[in-house]
Amino acid sequence: MGKIATSLPTAIVALDRSSSTALYRQLYDQLREAILSGRLSTGTRLPSTREFADDLGIARNTVLNAFEQLYAESYLERRVGGRHLRFSATAG
């Protein structure tokens, strides 16, 4: 199978189902790199996990696993009152 792109700006996520790297890890790696390189800036909103999973054509748990790792490493922060996630300026 080929790569899957999202509707995020500049299609920063392209998952390769034929890769030996797990999909959640590919997603985590690509989002982390986009944050660190500045392609995704502080305050950028991500879609909900359900919407993101649907856009990528993957299971919601795959997105949840990637996001949880990004939360654990302070690359993402949760905001109460919304379904969107915001990138944290304190990452790293």
Image (spheres, rainbow, N blue to C red):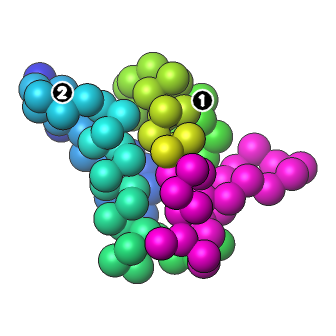
The quarter of the displayed image where residue 66 is located = top left
Measured as percent of width and height from the top left, residue 29 is found at 31, 52
What amino acid is labelled 2 in the image? Arg
In front: 10, or 19? 19
Query: Residue 52: x percent and y percent?
Result: 51, 38
Q: Alpha-carbon distance for marks 2 and 1?
A: 19 Å
Q: What kind of element bears circle 2?
A: loop
Residue holding disc 1: 50
Please report the bounds of the magenta region as a residue range.
70-92
Neighbor class of circle 2 (other Cα within 10 Å; few <14, some 14-19, many 20+) is some
Task: Specify which label sits upstream in the sequence, 2 or 1.
Answer: 2
Q: Is residue 19 visible?
A: yes
Say left or right for 79 vs 49.
Answer: right
Residue assigned mark 2:
17
Residue under the point 54% across and 71% down: 91
| Amino acid beneath label 1 | Arg
